[in-house]
Image (tube, rainbow, N blue to C red):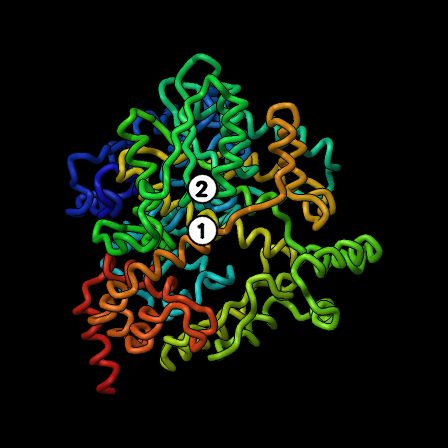
Amino acid sequence: MLKAGVPFFVALPDTEAGRAVARHPLLQDPELEVHTHSSGRPWLITRPLEGRLRILRAGTSAVAVAGLHEEDAGRLERALRRLPDRDAFVADVSRLAGDFHVIAAHGAELLVRGTAYGVRAVHYTELEGCVVVSDRARVLAELTGADLDEGVFATHLMGAWTHALFRRPLWKGVRAVPSGRYLAVSSGRPVTRQWHRVPEPEVPLAEGARRLREELLTAVGLRVAGGGTVSADMSGGLDSTSIAFAAAQLMGDRGELILTSGGDSEDSEDLYWARRAAKHLPHVEHDVFHGRELPLFYEGLLDPDDAFDFPANVPVCRERAGAVHRRMAARGSRLHLSGMGGDQLFLGLPGHYHDLVLRSPLEALHRLRGYRVMFSWRRRDVLRALLDRRSYAEALRTSLPDPGTGTELLGVDRLAWFFKPPCPPWMTEHARELVADELRAAAATAEPLHPCRGRHMELSCLLLSSKLLNATEDMALRMGIRIETPYADDRVIDAALSVRIPDRATPYAYKQLIAEAMRGILPRELAERRTKLSGGQANERGLRHHRSAIAALWDGSELAARGLADETVLQRMSRNPNSREFGGQTPEVALNLEAWLRSTAPVAEGRQRATQRASK
């Protein structure tokens, strides 16, 4: 079960089967709170964060709001009275600002809604004839003793690169409610219904920036309203600096704000811009982490207490990020504001112009010319990409993993349905066969998140980012502090996505939408920064420093035991991270997967399965 301090909930229908599930040994932890249906049967078993669970009741109906939410008792009461009408209830309660789950009961019916873009996920499974719902796939897997779905897991070996694959839970029998839908359980049957639709990008820049500003200030305001000590990242980039300045304005003198910045050297460009920003906030403390105070990447890779639903890239940077989180927790910060999620909203994707070139050819070709120069694309490659009119399903069918091939990070596949990564040299033939089978199966029924490629890829990136945010939040909580990500709130995302594509996806302006939205709050000189550091050099330095320890990890590898990776290749790659033999690839993805497997199932289980497979 999830470690102490990490929140989760299990929701049960008002049935005797639900009462039986509540007796499961894993749900007997004294830390858990049990809330009942009007009948007295268990309804909600939860480990909430302090102050993040609110329950209202009326007759046989009840609603719980779990997470950060706007205080509006009147709206919740009105929504509760409308509960027999599922869609009206969900629409009403979803107008609240914040980042939260809704769990409702009306008689024998159970209803659970997460957030529109996946930050607050909803999963369900069946146990002893009862539909059991949770925000955590891992909790349901542990309750049911579910086996790892090896085929689904294998699709992560090249990274989480397409929504048709990474959206699925990694355990057999555990299902995910699609983004923008809610789950209703009635008469023992689970059904999902649409509650949210992505806004069409029709709003001009000026109006869109005003709406975004309002929603972002609301989101930050919800988080700092309690006063006290609050900390915030300030990397010097537009995203985190905008959050920091919004927090400083909204808090005023009602609490203490600590801004954190770091750099591996004193001449770091990020650190230069962070210090430049801090000069505009002389009343706010700026805590700078110097090179030696920041652990290298790849320190503390394996942590048996990790309990993520998804093999996120947390292990590689755990100790580096943890240095900031631990220090802020020790200084009494009650939450830490992060600019994560800003890139997905404000960088803009050139893929939008694959669709717009047919409707607005002159404007689209002008923008594509700028992207071609920016990314050093060849004209013939851009033309070939624009002429590619395959459907999403067709693209999946023709994307089987092929050793030695792949696309560059900034290549023309930014005009495709997804970024197809290179096939790792350590991936076995068995693993490639598993991935090929999963791709064929997915292609048979796959539907894009939006008919337009650019919008589909945009939404896919947002949903993947949401999964990474969940893991980062859990890691920080175990270090004593709560991470808050205002850019991930539904209303903030909706405000950004409603803006016209040419006003927020352009090679001729850097993050134009957030810069315009923060006009008057963020000093002009800071909004004019046009660069962004990738962290690649720091990552490479950590990889070189820890290469011997990393190579040793592959002795007794869980990935190898399952027949998914060649440990000999991984050892060579780890000892020679810059070798041309591997085409610039590193073992980072394999390390994240290995760490996740070791926290999920014992190595012996993997070896047993490998032996069984070999004997067939």
Q: Is residue 574 visible?
A: yes
Which of marks 2 and 1 precedes in the sequence? 2
Q: Camera-side residue: 132 or 252?
A: 252
Mark 2 belongs to which amino acid?
Gly
Q: Is residue 135 above or below residue 90?
A: below
Q: Circles 1 and 2: CB distance less than 8 Å?
A: yes
Q: In which quarter of the view is residue 546 placed?
A: bottom left
Q: Which mark is residue 114?
A: 2
Q: Label 1, label 2: how many angstroms apart (C-alpha)?
A: 9 Å
Q: Is residue 558 above or below residue 474?
A: below
Q: Residue at x 31, y 47 (%)?
A: 295
Mark 1 — residue?
177
* Other residues around mark 2 within 10 Å, as few (<14) / some (14–19) / many (≥20): many
> On residue 309, which mark appears?
none
Say how many tags the image has: 2
Residue 99 occupies quadrant: top left
Residue 495 placement (x, y as % from top left): 62, 36
